[in-house]
């Protein structure tokens, strides 16, 4: 090895290969050495790094770039732990050392769960007839290429059968993805209307009250690390029993018992948060538009456009103190739609302190403000008697939250005056604890009060804002 240093510049000759002169404030990345990826292919990891072999970077950008790359890799949900180091050589040349601990990827998981909208609803009225059971096979990182296979057989309160395959990292630049899916769900008990802001149920033990089939194909384009475009085309076939149509002719509209339509949606997402599972810093934006009914099946009169926007803002205010503001809004072009197209709040988006209620409408806005204090910093421990390394090392953290929510659901044509939460501002406040652990789950307990002075404890096992 021969090194020359002339006037603040270095010229490096290694094994007979000459490298261009490099200023002292820059680094040349010679190679990225990866260990621990027994399953995951090398290109899947390199795709998430902000710099790679052969790149020249400023020295000041090395540590922030490694931290950003670590966050990108963890956001794949393929690894429990990711660590970086660097070996420095003469001539401002380095090797990046990347070590990962892979997760357990094949999950033949027994299903034993409640079938309610949320855990708090089930705990208030725990009826064992509302449990689901079955088997779910989810194979993440299939073939080591971040592909996903998903097969589910769920019986009990809500039957569901799913087959799904997702293939990312297609093309020369590995920035294209395709996925296909088919699902069938059936249930004997169905929410056929809403009264006094609560779902009203009908059950038929001899026949299925509601069935739904959904087949889709999706294409995703990822031009940069943090932005994605997705187009997805569905064929949806929903049908209800004659009794449900008699109880509420507005379920599908004008007494229809079947709702068949094509649907197409487009999603753009820009996300530079430090974590998509439990973000503490960064921001993100998501825009979605979808069209119900393409004129291919024209015997159903409720064609509709929906437009959604979601903003995420996360900021570290001081040591252990964090702030988050998340806002989402939806507007539709057709306001005279049946109940099946009026899913407002209380479904995927839930107001703190309103777990017992649903607010149906065509348009809505919700904003959540959260102050977080880190009671227990991110830590890890080993379970000595467990020899499976994907489970034996556990990371965890605990956060104390102050919560404030505000929301508005619009319905120009409300059908039941007892649903008085629609067309009026709703708000709540509370305090909560989040226990964050591995495999993307957050255990939360909250105590909250809503606009009407109702208080209570609310429990969740979820990934916050993941469905937003």
Image: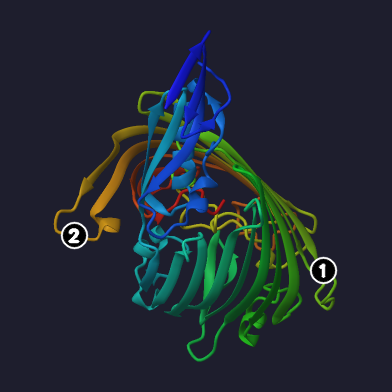
Q: Position of residue 154 (x, y in %)?
A: 45, 78
- Using the rendered image of the protein, determine whether residue 260 is visible from the camera's viewpoint: yes
The numbered dot on residue 386 is: 2
The numbered dot on residue 273 is: none
Q: Position of residue 389 (x, y in %)?
A: 26, 56
- In depth, the one of 266 and 447 nearer the eye is 266
The numbered dot on residue 294 is: 1
* Mark 1 or 2: the one toward you: 2
Q: Is residue 217 left or right of residue 426?
A: right
Residue drawn at x 47%, y 63% as measured from the top left = 117
Between the C-alphas of marks 1 and 2, the distance is 54 Å
Q: Secondary structure at mark 1?
A: loop
- In depth, the one of 145 and 215 nearer the eye is 145
Describe the colour scheme in one phrase.
rainbow
Question: Would you identify the image quadrant in which residue 239 lies?
Answer: bottom right
Residue drawn at x 51%, y 46% as measured from the top left = 46
Which tag, 1 or 2, sits closer to the chain's start? Answer: 1
Q: Residue furthest bottom?
A: 206
Q: Residues within 10 Å of mark 1 (few under 14, many from 20)?
A: few
Q: Is residue 387 above or below residue 340?
A: above
Q: Position of residue 425 (x, y in %)?
A: 61, 42
Q: Is residue 243 above or below residue 278?
A: below
């Amino acid at each position: 090895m021969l090194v020359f240093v002339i006037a603040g510049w270095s010229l490096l000759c290694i094994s007979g290969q000459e490298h261009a002169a490099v200023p002292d404030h820059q680094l040349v990345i010679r190679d990225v050495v990866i260990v621990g990826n027994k399953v995951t292919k090398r290109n899947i990891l390199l795709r998430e790094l902000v710099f790679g072999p052969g790149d020249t970077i400023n020295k000041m950008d090395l540590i922030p770039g490694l931290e950003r790359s670590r966050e990108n890799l963890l956001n794949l949900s393929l690894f429990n732990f990711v660590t970086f180091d660097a070996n420095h050589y003469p001539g401002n040349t380095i090797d990046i050392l990347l070590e990962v601990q892979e997760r357990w990827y094949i999950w033949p998981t027994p299903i034993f769960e409640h079938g309610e909208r949320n855990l708090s609803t089930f705990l208030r009225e725990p009826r064992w007839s509302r449990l689901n059971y079955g088997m779910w096979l989810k194979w993440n990182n299939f073939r080591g290429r971040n592909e996903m296979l998903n097969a589910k057989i769920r019986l009990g309160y809500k039957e569901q059968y799913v087959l799904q395959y997702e293939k990312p990292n297609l093309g020369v630049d590995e920035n294209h993805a395709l996925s296909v899916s088919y699902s069938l769900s059936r249930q004997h008990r169905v929410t056929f209307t809403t009264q006094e802001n609560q779902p009203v149920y009908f059950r038929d033990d001899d026949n299925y009250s509601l069935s739904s089939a959904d087949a889709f194909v999706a294409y995703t384009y990822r031009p940069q690390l943090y932005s994605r475009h997705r187009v997805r085309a569905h064929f949806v076939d929903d049908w209800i029993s004659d009794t449900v149509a008699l109880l509420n002719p507005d379920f599908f509209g004008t007494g229809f018992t079947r709702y068949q339509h094509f649907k197409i949606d487009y999603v753009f997402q820009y996300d530079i948060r430090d974590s998509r599972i439990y973000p503490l810093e960064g921001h993100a934006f998501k825009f979605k538009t979808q069209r119900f009914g393409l004129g291919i099946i024209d015997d159903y009169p409720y064609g509709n456009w929906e437009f959604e926007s979601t903003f995420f803002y996360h900021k570290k205010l001081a040591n252990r103190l964090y702030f988050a503001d998340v806002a989402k809004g939806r507007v539709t072009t057709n306001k005279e739609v049946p109940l099946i197209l009026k899913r407002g709040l209380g479904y995927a988006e839930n107001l703190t302190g309103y777990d017992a209620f649903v607010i149906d409408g065509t348009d809505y806005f919700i904003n959540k403000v959260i102050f977080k204090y880190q009671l227990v910093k991110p830590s890890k421990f080993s379970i000595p008697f467990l020899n499976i390394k994907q489970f034996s090392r556990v990371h965890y953290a605990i956060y104390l939250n102050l919560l404030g929510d505000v929301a508005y659901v619009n319905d120009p044509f409300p059908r039941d005056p007892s649903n008085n939460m629609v067309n009026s501002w709703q708000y709540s406040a509370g305090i909560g604890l989040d226990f964050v652990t591995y495999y993307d789950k957050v255990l939360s307990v909250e105590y909250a009060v809503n606009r009407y002075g109702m208080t209570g404890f609310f429990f969740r096992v979820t990934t916050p804002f993941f469905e937003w």
